[in-house]
Amino acid sequence: MNQRKILVTAALPYANGPIHLGHLVEYIQTDIWVRFQKLRGHNCLFMWADDTHGTAIMIRARKEGRSEEEVIAEANAEHQRDFAGFQIQYDNYGSTHSDENKKLCGTVWQAIRDAGLVKEKDVDQLFDTEQGTFLADRFVRGTCPECQAENQPGDNCSKCGTTYSPAELTNPVSTLSGSTPEIRTAKHLFIELEQLHGFLEDWTQTGEHLQPEVANYLRGHFLGDPQSTEGAKPLRDWDISRPAPYFGFEIPDCPGNYWYVWFDAPIGYIASTQQWCERNGDSLDNWWKNDAAEIHHFIGKDITYFHTLFWPGMLKSAGYSLPTKVHIHGFLTVNGEKMSKSVGTAFKAKTYLDHLPPSALRYYYASKLGSRLDDIDLNFDEFISKVNSDLVGKVINLASRSAKFVKETGLSTNYPDDGGLFESAASAGDEIAIAYENCDFNKAMRLILELADKANPFVENAEPWNLRKDPAKAQELQDVCTIALNLFRQLVIYLSPVLPDLAEKTGELLNDPLRHWDQSQTPLTGSSVAKFKHMMKRIEEKDVKAMEEASKIEAEQESTQVENNAEKFVDSEQPMIDEPMTEECTIEDFMKVDLRVARIVNAEHVEGARKLLRLTLSLGGDHRKQVFAGIKAAYEPDQLVGRLVVMVANLKPRQMKFGLSEGMVCASGPGGEEVFLLTPDEGSKPGQRVH
RNA sequence: GGGGCUGUAGCUCAGUUGGUUAGAGCAGGGGACUCAUAAUCCCUUUGUCGCGGGUUCGAGUCCUGCCAGCCCUACCA
């Protein structure tokens, strides 16, 4: 067999959230396919990375008060932890926020420029003045201009279905700050994809690279049919830039503008490969500019057009290899329903692993996954019965019912006559391999289980438990068990892309590691047999219930947080109207004000004062400040003693009627009873400066 | 609104270029066995192939209309 060079990618997980069982459909599918190719002896690489750019990450970092780099580093670690937990094995895990990626983006960009595909257009977009950012549609809500329904999303009305641009909304509100955004015009860069129409028509419609329903979808929706009466439809220009602020890479020849996340994300596939090449002394062109190397992308149907139109267009323009195949899968439903975070059916990878073994899900997905785009359903009753009856009851049962009879003797030195069982299972290998190759994993599993269904009756008829009672039949007993264990081993080799763990344990049991598909074609003889240990536990309903329960609790906790956030979003605009924004100041201006954390060590009423309390503030050590604060109506002195506040420490002391005030305590609110002191978060210490 | 995909036994699905009485696993029923993680083996019940038209000697399979579900609908991802 010729050794193929195969480069595989899965969609890049977005660094803004945890991995859940829906993601894992794809990642497990990809991993199985990669493991299968490696098992067949091909030179196969799985190149992967986190997708790190875009508004969502930027907003999240702001909310959490840390840098984007911190957010994505944490996500990266969590993601890789989850993948390890599910035995997903990749050759490199990079990040789209890497030097390699930045450079490659520049190269691809230049090529696209040189090809004359880039043009500039002005775009009207809503701008959140409070957050200082342009708003993507999903960060805007407002009243539908058509039917007046309130609180509608930025792109179309959920009541009447009208589509519009966010700028057309009546009373638009930014969901980030609750403020009213204004329309601003900004320059955007576009790629004129239509110039590549002919190429994309050819590439998508050859039938080689895409599943037929995907090709139909693209033709029906984007490309049009040149043969039809309506003819081809022009492809729209692709808006490839975002004005600052944006978390991403700044476009070198267009300062102040950044590549849209979907531009740099797929280039991350190449960047990840480059990291691998540098580590392993290989050249990038060997993989991405080499007709002898195949490139396979695994993605979900939601990101079809990025990978089947824009991406091939980019690759073509930049002179890289085009995808050999884009494998597109459907979504996961849970017990027949769409996954839902709020109901708690979007099970996190970690939650699953806390209660259930990874192999079970890997096998269950494999038994459901086909080469088409149908959604697959995770039904827990079926999950339990499939794993238990197929794997434990049928496959592993072969070993557990025969291994201990040959623990002393090992396997027979010559493979006995098994009535052609091994031979016919060996020849079924080709069909199973084809099913794997075509991503028809469900078919592969069906074929393998058919073999198991033939192996068990063999043991049944041979009755090794009776043979062992008669010392004269020792040889026969060893032969029967040699056959049973070889049939078992053969099944495990076929299953090993799905169940690497089982393959490992089987290798140990029979003292012969399973490394290559071809080992399924020759019986193993004369090998010693180790003491049999359970290779996989039956799934118990209580474990599934425990996981469901844990997930529900997580969902409830999160939804409380979301509600709290939602309240912020309906905030009144009144404060901003009452006190409009002051003029811009520089960082230097700000730094003149020395804000410090202080502890109120004493608070008392001031005789004769209507509004003031006398506070004694400690900045640590002997540093004390006396401050008269106009908060008498809002706070009782007793409530204040001991708590931390923020004060202006270098304010010029001011002689007041009742004494010298040596600073100010920070508070918000219009005054009177509505005064709210600022409180530093736990952990801050008196005397620390606020930056 | 437009488009894609799906609809076969209680459940999950196979059904190749249209060709005899439509299949498998699980679940259900009956029996056997006891080596094995209450595992295994044998036998067995179940279908208006979403609905209605059409093409054909013949349709689960092709065409068409309808119904239902899922998904997509480009400066949203």
Image (cartoon, rainbow, N blue to C red):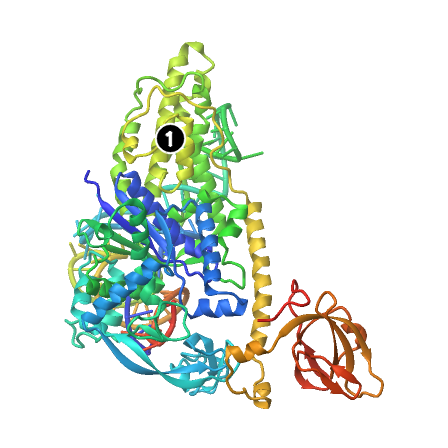
Quadrant containing the C terminus of chain A is bottom right
* Secondary element at image label 1: helix
Locate residue A112, reporting x and y percent. 22, 69
Locate residue A20, reporting x and y percent. 47, 56
- Residue found at the far right of this picture: A607
Compared with residue A66, is residue A188 higher up or lower down, i.e. above or below?
below
> Front-most of A656 and A128?
A656
Compared with residue A126, is residue A316 higher up or lower down, i.e. above or below?
above
Locate residue A487, reporting x and y percent. 35, 29
The amino acid sitting under disc 1 is Phe
- The residue indicated by pointer 1 is A488
Residue appearing at x 33%, y 43% in the figure: A35
> Front-most of A328 and A317?
A317
> Front-most of A50 and A568?
A50
Locate residue A279, reporting x and y percent. 32, 47
Quarter of the image for residue A256 reads: bottom left
Res. A266 in view: no
Residue appearing at x 60%, y 86% in the figure: A575
Image mark 1: chain? A
Res. A661 in view: yes
Residue appearing at x 25%, y 38% in the figure: A430
Compared with residue A72, is residue A236 higher up or lower down, i.e. above or below?
below
Residue appearing at x 39%, y 35% in the figure: A503
